Amino acid sequence: MSAIVGTRVDSLNALKVFSRAAELRSFTDAGQQLGLSSSAVGKAVARLEKRLGVRLFHRSTRSITLTQEGQQFLESCRRIFSEIDAIESGFAQSKGAPKGRLRVSLPMVGMLMMPTLSGFMRAYPEIELDLDFSDHLVDVVNDGFDVVVRTGDASDSRLIARTLGAYRLQLVGAPSYFARAGTPAKPEDLLNHACLHHRYPTSGKLQRWPLVTPASGNDVALPVTASASTVEPLIALAEEGLGVTCVPNFAIRRQLADGSLVTVLDEYVEHSGVFRAVWPSSPYVSPKLRVFVDFLAANLLPAADAKRLRTPAKGKRS
């Protein structure tokens, strides 16, 4: 009996090794996460291939990729682990605290969510967060993420989506900058100001500032004093009094509260957006995923921000 149990445990471990290697596309990275050598991972996969009678990976000196059979087997492994997770989570629910590894994909601006994520880690110390920051589109199912946080709509029928909260873009600068350069009263005044722009890392294009005026519409050609592919440097430059920038309101909550940044041209800025959490459709949602999404919905974007979004801007015209 013990030999049978041992064989089944070994088989389950082999599935875990294969799944981690398939998700990371690397024997070396899988070994580092599992505490094994890359050679041990490769041998475990080879034994599994021999047992199944199929090749699971295409191997080269630089990379590994899944074969068609490997992709099918990975999907089967995920179903198996989902069932195991459901059983374990059922016991965890009866005992209380959710636990386990949660793989999360966040946008690059997600670094500004760190206070919320830190709060989650303090509230749920038995959940291991595996965070991946990227502005690229990800395949939630095939890339092996438990949950993905993004802006915009979710149209994939394989996914479940939940709105986490609303945000808006705001134009801000330091009081010292406006004391020196003057406070813009209308969008055209920005032509004489130092403008700090966000540049999309995927396309290299500058993010358009959502300025609306009856005379020029949305076509104010703003000067470019500096640009950055992430928001944090723009906020830091603005705090140093080096110009005006356009950033999400949730990213500057502290600076607005302590007065290191102030908003301008609020009545001419027309923008709103939402953050959503999406995850693979399943009849069962694990407790660790449920508490993570609930926590973000309650803490990421306070209700006060959403209330402000529902108030029409004074400069909005039909």
Image: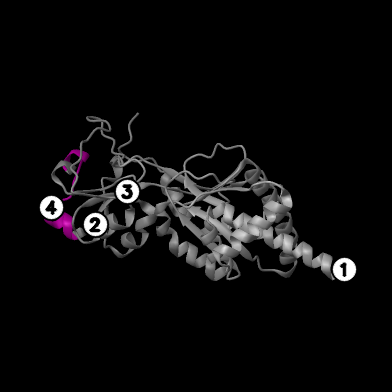
Secondary element under disc 4, as helix, strand or loop, is helix
Kind of residue sitting beneath label 3:
Gln
Instruction: Identify residue for label 3.
Output: 170
- Bin the neighbour count of mark 2 within 10 Å (Cα to Cα): few under 14, some 14-19, many 20 and up: many
In the rendered structure, which segment of residues is drawn in magenta? Answer: 176-189
Of the numbered discs in the image, which one, if any, rests on residue 238? 2
User: Is the C terminus in the top left, top right, bottom left or bottom right quadrant?
Assistant: top left
At mark 2, the secondary structure is: helix
Label placed on residue 80? none
- Circles 4 and 3, Cβ within 8 Å, touching? The answer is no
Q: Residues within 10 Å of mark 1 (few under 14, many from 20)?
A: few
First of labels 2, 4 by sequence position: 4
Q: Earlier in the sequence, mark 3 or mark 1?
A: 1
Q: Amino acid at mark 2?
A: Ala
Question: What amino acid is at disc 1?
Answer: Met
Q: Amino acid at mark 4?
A: Ala
Instruction: Estimate the spatial distance between the alpha carbons at disc 4 and disc 1, rounded to whole Å.
Output: 81 Å
**Residue holding disc 1:** 1
Which residue is found at the position 48% from the left and 47% from the top?
150
Magenta: main secondary structure: helix
Circle 4 sits on which residue?
181
The answer to whether marks 2 and 1 mark residues whose Cβ atoms lie closer than 8 Å is: no
Q: Horizontal placement of 62 versus 212: left or right?
A: right
Mark 4–mark 3 Cα distance, whole angstroms, equals 19 Å
